[in-house]
Image (tube, rainbow, N blue to C red):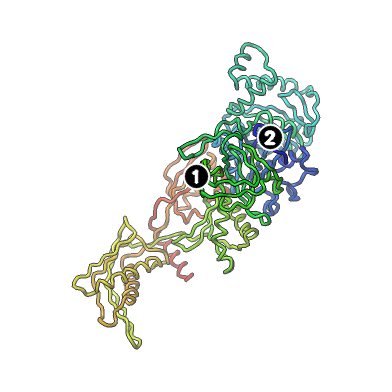
Amino acid sequence: MKEYSTPNIRNIALASHSGSGKTMLAEALLFYTGALTRQGEINAGTTVSDFQDEEKRRGISISTSVIPVEYNETKINILDTPGYTDFVGEVISSLRVVDGVIIPVDSVAGAEVGTELAWSYADDFNLPRFVLINMMDRENANFQKALESVRQMTSVRLLPLQLPWGEKADFSGVIDILENKAYTGDGKESVDIPEEFHDQVEELRMEIIEAAAEGNDELLMKYLDGESLSENEIISGLKNAVMTQTFVPVLVSSGTANVGMAPLLKLIEKLMPAPGERGPVSGEGAKGEEELQSTDAGSFAAYVWKTTADPYVGKITYFRVYSGSVSSDSKVWNHQEDEEERFGNISVMRGKQQLDVKNVHAGDIVAVPKLNVTSTGHTLGDEGHPIKLPVPAYPRALYRVAVIPATQADSAKLSPTLTRLCEEDMTLSWKQDTTTKETILEGMGGQHIDVAIRKAKDIFQTELNTRIPKVPYQETISKSGAAQYRHKKQSGGSGQFAEVHMRLDPLPEERFEFKNEVFGGSISKNYMPAIEKGVKTIMEEGVLAGYPVVNVKVAVYDGKEHPVDSKPVAFEICARQVFKMAFREAGGVLLEPIMEAKVTVPEENMGDILGDFNTRRARVQGMDTKGGRSVVSAQVPLAEMQRYTTDLRSMTGGRGMFEMEFVRYQQLPPHIADEVIAENTEEE
């Protein structure tokens, strides 16, 4: 692929609800510009974007594909993002490195949950955007209805720059209000606007000129003085208005029918900013905050927004150059790891196809294979100019599974495989739960975890099984209790002897305290470490149901020893037994983790959420309204929230969101505690 300089690059994400036609739109743009000789299909698994086996199997995008489209001496890097909520991390990573976003809206369904989510993240990154009413050839397509659904979703002014020429089966082209022309089919040919559109076009054209004048003070004065604006002035004013988000242009198309491609590309080129036009980017330099200009003249700095593992190529690192330029076979510095990396061939990715390029200019998005220490979120640059570019905030994972290796060989690969998966995806994380002794993988939902497990098998050859994680209960005491126990063992040769008298008291503020209250030397001091070790061992193992014991003060107040048979191991064994007895005397109980959950839903779902919380032993802490949506705060046991992600989606049609964090432990109700103890006893 040829080189493109910074002014001739556009970085645009396609972000919206699943099924709004993003992948087929990217396909149609490649076909229109001659990069493809035949348009692929999602059902046949032949699109450039959805090249992974998992994407073909599921029929949805699960990771972002880079689709560079060459048009009119401009390279448009289109990032086709997944629409399914589980893969929102991919959307955030993509929006981090683009300069504009196109939000396709299904002409039948209108704005949906994923549309709202994409809009909200575009707001977070302050990105200029287009709304694209897509798939206008569908049965029941309705431009006005789809447009109205977007108006209900946002307070930003929406301004149609195009109208559909017909709808449903009659959708044959695009009326371009800006150019005062009608384009048939893909847009290669223009004709006069049909008579029936004249009045509507004239009215909208006046609105567009007004919006253009508002985008620039000089133009506004000229407009108010009654002077007419030239085409260049209108474009310049509109571009300013788009970049400041004074209004959002509305366009129309159909990717599947290949209608409206040329007018869309023309508007991306004219109205979307080039990398250098969005102002400097801030990073953390050696002397505090530093601003980077998107020019080749600056020091090289690039942000790694995505890493993937390819079974044939190995690790592929995707990055955007924010400052300076870079060539193949260069040495660069990883500022997070403080290590040198060596670039081999730099490629422009088109789906899975690698198009080699020798030099890369500021603002471009490219990839390089086989880097050693670099992962997502790292900054690459010059060794002598340390800078770290900011990493966006990702939502906290809310869906957890316990992973179990299928074989002994898989067990050895478990840790490296999970680490590699989480390096690639910022919304995946894993940990060892010290309470339940399980390996926990956390993600955004069932599909997200399922894809990760399949990737572990297909790419890293590690087969993993999953189950619902155990709840990390704890055990403690509800009152003081004491017991004594004698350990005696005689089996020829030297025997074992120890006797320990122990008292347990509740210790609410601390996890554990050990006291030696023996007077008169009935137990020597040198046996105390062995007694404490025995106590700590049994506290880790648990007494009632195999969960760790917490908030206990242990006091050894008497006992006996034997001059010959007493030894540390005897006192350790004795301490374990006497602790169990004293624990039961002290009214042992189970504690469960309580979470603070904040659920945001459309107002019409409020009643369902409150009713559902009643069945989950939740205590509602408060209700609020935020941006036309209801927010419910509640404290609820973790045991009741293990699969809440799935339940909330089904209750709200996917429009509900929640976040959750641990607040405290509290006593488990006796009838539930009995069930947990019985269950764990059976397992043993």
Give left or right: position of 306 versus 76: left
Is 215 located above or below residue 568 in the figure? above
Q: Quadrant of residue 240?
A: top right
The residue type indicated by label 1 comes to Val
Q: Kindly report the distance in space between the C-alpha atoms of the residues bearing marks 1 and 2.
A: 30 Å
Q: Earlier in the sequence, mark 1 or mark 2?
A: 2
Q: Where in the figure is residue 218, as x and y percent of width and height?
A: 60, 16
The quarter in which the N terminus is drawn is top right
Q: Give the crowd class for mark 1: few <14, some 14-19, many >=20 residues within 10 Å.
A: some
For this view, does 540 lie left or right of residue 216?
left
Q: Residue at x 68, y 28 (%)?
A: 270
Nearer to the camera, 171 or 331: 331
Instruction: Tell me the SS state at disc 2.
Output: strand
Q: Which mark is residue 628?
A: none
Question: Can you identify the residue that label 2 sits on?
Answer: 133
Does 254 sit above or below residue 218? below
Q: x, y percentage for residue 125?
A: 55, 36
Do the residues under discs 1 and 2 have CB atoms within 8 angstroms?
Answer: no
Q: Amino acid at mark 2?
A: Ile
What is the x, y in percent for residue 216?
A: 60, 20
Residue 646 visible here: no
Work out whether residue 50 or residue 58 is closer to the camera in this orientation and state it.
Answer: 50
Tag count in the figure? 2
What residue lies at 69% left-to-right and 18% top-to-bottom?
230
Residue farthest to the top, as pictured: 225
Spot occupied by residue 250 in the image (x, y as percentages of width and height) = 66, 30
Q: Is residue 554 above or below residue 308?
A: below
Quarter residue 123 falls in: top right
Disc 2: CA contacts within 10 A as few (<14), some (14-19) or many (>=20): many
Mark on residue 599?
A: 1
